[in-house]
Amino acid sequence: MCHYLYKAGWLYVTKGVRTLKGETNLKIQVSLFGDYSHITPTEEIIKDCISAFFQLGMLPSGNVQEMDPNTNRLEPRLSLQSMRNGISVNFLSNRIDFLVMPLPNSPGASLNAESFCVQVNQIATSLKKVLGVTFNRVGFAAERFLAPITPEKLETLRKKFTTEAFTIFPDKPVVEWNIRNVVLDRFDKNVDQDVNVIYNISKVKVQLGDHTGLREFDTLHLTTDINIPLEKRVNPSLDVLSDFLEQSIARDKAIYNGLTAVTYA
């Protein structure tokens, strides 16, 4: 069960783009996969990052920690934090995560998938120059929950998304449900690779509060995960990254539009 806590309004999602009024973007993330065990927050690396990333409004630190399986201890890892728009870049031993949580009234609230990925391309360009960062796979992920939906509408949607054969206890109310699909798609241009397009829809209960008080409602939580399969490899060029993100955004929009066309019909 995941929880989002948002203050300046508070937001709790029990269980855990833009958009229609009442919808909320929770997270946008891009991940580069490779060997980054050598990129640690040493004095020299911190110094190089200050020089290189200050112009992008980002400061380095060693606040992120990761469990080292060899020593069974938490080890400090390098991170970059934006002073402008809430983007963070976390360096783990086998991945680099570019992350923003564009909640209302937060530093990242002005970012959508397109503007976030523009920033990712800029940061990745500097990472290649300063730290020699390369990659062998790429991933894109997004989370959002839709506007409040009545219990009656949610039950209608559940029956649209699932078959009657799956209703094992037809005389009992279904309190929680989720649906996950994995599609193997082909990305063209410089990517030229099969890609996993994964989307998950869950019924969730939300408690949302601000200066007017606290209200609770049900809705759908939509997650998108688009990634190059583990057994595949791509050419580690910035053109591949840019093309992958462009096509991932297009697939994410198609998933969102397809779901909301049914949900808000």
Image (cartoon, rainbow, N blue to C red):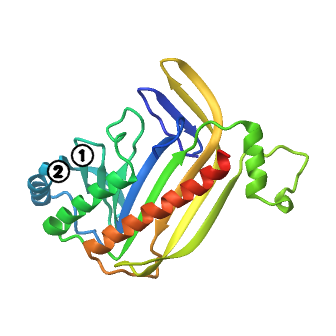
Q: Please say whether residue 76 is visible from this viewpoint.
A: no
Left/right of residue 215 with respect to residue 124 in the rendered view:
right
Residue 201 higher or lower than 214, as above or below: below
Q: Please say whether residue 25 is visible from this viewpoint.
A: yes
Residue 62: image location, x then y, percent: 23, 51
Labels 1 and 2: the sequence-earlier one: 2
- Secondary structure beneath dot 2 equals helix
Q: Residue at x 44, y 48 (%)?
A: 27
Residue 180: image location, x then y, percent: 64, 61
Q: Residue at x 91, y 46 (%)?
A: 171
Q: Which mark is residue 82?
A: 1
**Label 1 to label 2: alpha-carbon separation:** 8 Å
Q: Residue furthest right?
A: 171
Q: Residues within 10 Å of mark 1 (few under 14, many from 20)?
A: some
Residue 4 higher or lower than 38, as above or below: above
Confirm or deny contact between disc 1 and disc 2 (CB under 8 A). yes
Q: Which residue is mark 2?
A: 56
Left/right of residue 176 with respect to residue 255 in the rendered view:
right
Q: Residue at x 20, y 65 (%)?
A: 125
Residue 188: image location, x then y, percent: 41, 78
Residue 154 higher or lower than 7, as above or below: below
**Could you say which quadrant of the image residue 173 lies in?**
top right
Depth check, front residue: 70 or 98: 98
- Secondary structure beneath dot 1 equals strand
Look at label 2 and name its amino acid.
Answer: Leu
